[in-house]
Amino acid sequence: MTAISTRPEKIQGGAALWRIAQIIGVLSLVVLLVGLVLTTELALDVLWNVLIPLVPASLLISPAIWRNVCPLATINMLLNRSAGGRVLKPNIITTAGMWGIVLLGILVPARRFLFNSDGVALAVTVTLVAAAALVLGAFFEFKAGFCNAICPVLPVERLYGQHPMVQIGNPRCNPCTLCTTKGCIDLTPAKSIAQTLGSARRSHAWLMTAYGVFAASFPGFVVGYYTTQDGPLATAGAVYTNVGLWAFGSYLATVVFVRAFNANAGRTMVLLAASAAGLYYWFAAATITSAFAIDGILTLGIRVVGLTLVGVWLLRATPFVGSENSVSRAQHG
């Protein structure tokens, strides 16, 4: 199998620093799991209102930041340091990606009636996901079994990471062994969505693909989550209904926009990413300041910083999404 370098020459010397960051990431995960059981309120506040809000911003800057330090990715690769495992072939990539989208759709709304208040339940869930990442890593080569397949964060990584603001290499997989035969965000972030959509990207048919439905629904999904309230398990049905309706409305609005303006996949994906990220920081700002009882003026500050980042990302992405944009041009394989 042909090996491909995935790390820019200028940052090769930083591999040791990334390794340290990865170790810190795994240790932090262990501390978090213990904290969720022993100091639940503090651990939940730190996770949901400090750490998680940083992830969308890091993905806009470069998906490599998060993917290079993600503790689940480190766990996924513990048992597959040498090539020779199963690769993720085209015929299962779509199915695996659908599972990641389904997991995202289940787990995020579950915060409202479970994970925002029950530290033990969250710790058990994270442990099970980590165990799945470890086991899949033993059977698949490098990131093929989890990170590039069923990871529930992967759909968001693709959407926000489609036009990185900075170029960062991938020290985990250098050289690349093509463990994922198409759509690998580590190898070619700008082509990952195009390869995921396949030939459907050349027409409005991309709106009927699994990833197309996810992307078109995602801004509404964000609004749907933030227009619900934390409550007991009995509110689960109401939470999923509200999130589902907002997501469906977002999908319909995207379909109308695409058909009304004959917008191509590339331009629409950029607008969907900016909309979802902007909405996230608008709503999350109030949640963060409320959780820590901080002066409300900081809500405005967080919104300004978040929306400014999204705006800069959008302006930077605009030159890439003309009539012959990167999503339309990208080729498979």
Image: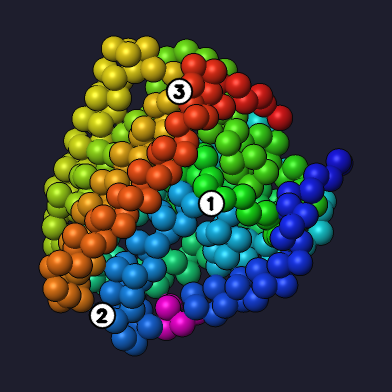
Specify the amino acid type for callout 3: Ala
- Label 2 with label 3: CB-CB less than 8 Å: no
Q: Judging from the image, what secondary structure is the residue with disc 2 in?
A: helix
**Front-lying residue, 57 or 68:** 57
Q: Mark 1 points at which residue?
A: 62
Q: Tell me which segment is drawn in magenta.
A: 30-34
Residue 204 in view here: yes
Q: Mark 2 points at which residue?
A: 41
Specify the amino acid type for callout 2: Glu
Report the number of discs. 3
Q: Select label 3 or label 1 by which is in front.
A: 1
Picture coordinates of residue 99, whole percent (x, y): 47, 42
Mark 3 vs mark 1: which is more N-terminal? Answer: 1
Q: Select label 2 or label 3 by which is in front.
A: 3
- Residue 119 lies, with reference to residue 193, above or below; the image says below
Specify the amino acid type for callout 1: Ser
- Residue 41 lies, with reference to residue 260, above or below; the image says below
Mark 2 vs mark 3: which is more N-terminal? Answer: 2
Picture coordinates of residue 277, whole percent (x, y): 34, 46
Q: Name the residue under label 3.
A: 265
- Label 3 with label 1: CB-CB less than 8 Å: no
Picture coordinates of residue 69, whole percent (x, y): 57, 65
Residue drawn where x is 65% and y is 76% of the image = 20
- Split into 4 quadrants, where in the image is the N terminus? top right
Q: Judging from the image, what secondary structure is the residue with disc 3 in?
A: helix
